[in-house]
Image (cartoon, helix red, strand yellow):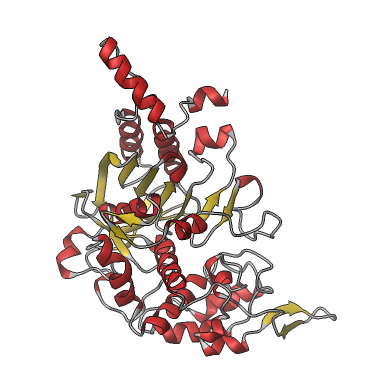
Amino acid sequence: MKHWLLASTFLLAACSAAQTDSRYDPVAFDPAPLDARLSEAVKSGEVIGVSALVWDEGREVYNAQYGLGDRERGTAVTEDMVWRIYSMTKPMTSAVIMQLVEEGVVSLDDPVSKFIPSFADVKVARLGANGAPELVAPDRPVTVEHLLTHTAGLGYGIFGEVSPTETMYARAELFKPGESLEAKVDRIAALPLLGQPGEQWFYSASIDVLGRIIEVVDGVSLGEAMEARLFGPLGMTETSFRVRPDQKARFVSNYAITPDGSFVLFEDGQSSPFLDDNGFQSGGGGLVSTLGDVAKFAEAMTRGGELGGVRILEEDTVATMMSAQTSPELPYLQPWIGGETGALFGYGGSVQVAATPEQQREAGRYPGQWGWSGAARTTFYMDPQNDAFGVILLQFFGAEDPQLHDDFQALALEQTRDDGVDVAAASE
């Protein structure tokens, strides 16, 4: 922490009127670099609108909005706008599963079939001796821990025809509205695994399966369980699996970026399917939320599972979730973690286990950070080593993560890191 810095700051203030560099001052935070980068991103057309927040040492130090949440209607981004957070749902669903683990009603080693019988008959796809595809029984059951770490062997159906199994997931149209989570998960169980459980990392529908386990154990819908266990206790009054009528005017539109860098409307916020209760509550990607609500969850996790006197998880549980639970030697079938990224996977989110000076300077990566992103370019990270976190919300689909994500995190880290080292100077 910054205790020695705090004492030095007070001593300097008593002896002279000299100003302290905000990078080393636990009280001051200079918003100018972040303001300049975010406003420039809007002016240049890099993004349509952005909302961002930084928290450090027990307080919010940055909160700003730029651009439009609804370009067609000229609606400016405001702090209370509602966003599709998609896969940022996953850490929240995983936190609820870990509550069930703490209560002893779920074990990490439990086979999924204990809660979802259709998983007892799951098969693994592989090439046979003659090169023809065949289905075989798994070497071991798919467990709750496999689901938490995306090592169950499940596919997702959103990555194109990268493998025959992933193509089968895509053709199954698992995420169309109008079907219950129970029905979807049973259909997932009927599809083959792309590999043996525990033997590869592949980003998947596994957190949706965890959502169904929550429903089975608690005997209510996933939304009701998350409200009772997470959103209600933390005061996340704007977070759910649909946009309420009173939120409609504040719901952002979603866009898609074209090859030439321009944006086209993908989903109008005022006629969105999220305005209706379509029956499918996706624990892997179905939530809508606000900057403030996302920050409440992030603060609770950064504080070790507690917010405002309300404890949602034990400190040891949070530390486990934020620790690497996958091996560096594991095959990582997507480039986001493993290898030179310095990141592995914990429970429900990625864990930065190492960060080069260049990664710190250019992308704001720091050992111990935990978090995840959403498909429409929302992202958050929790940085317990520096007692900090950051949230940045955009709303568009694109082939790659925007540079703005890395720039935001790097500029935030430069002022929130606790060791007194200038990121830029340390990297030269």
- Look at the image and tell me whether residue 185 can be seen: yes
Lateral position of residue 417 relative to residue 426, left or right: left
Q: Which residue is depicted at the point 26% across and 64% down?
A: 233
Quadrant location, the C terminus: top right
**x, y percentage for residue 174?**
47, 78
- 291 is higher (above) or lower (below) than 423: below
- 5 is higher (above) or lower (below) than 396: above
**x, y percentage for residue 37?**
36, 34
Q: Choose between 109 and 254: the one closer to the eye.
A: 109
Image mark count: 0
Lateral position of residue 235 relative to residue 350, left or right: left
**x, y percentage for residue 236?**
25, 61
Q: Choose between 253 and 282: the one closer to the eye.
A: 282
- 212 is higher (above) or lower (below) than 230: below
Lateral position of residue 308 relative to residue 173, left or right: left
Residue lying furthest left in this view? 246
- Look at the image and tell me whether residue 21 can be seen: no
**x, y percentage for residue 16?**
27, 9
Residue lying furthest top in this view? 16
Q: Which residue is depicted at the point 50% across and 25% down?
A: 424
Q: Which residue is depicted at the point 32% across and 66% down?
A: 230
Quadrant location, the N terminus: top left
Q: Quadrant of residue 242?
A: bottom left
- 319 is higher (above) or lower (below) than 196: above
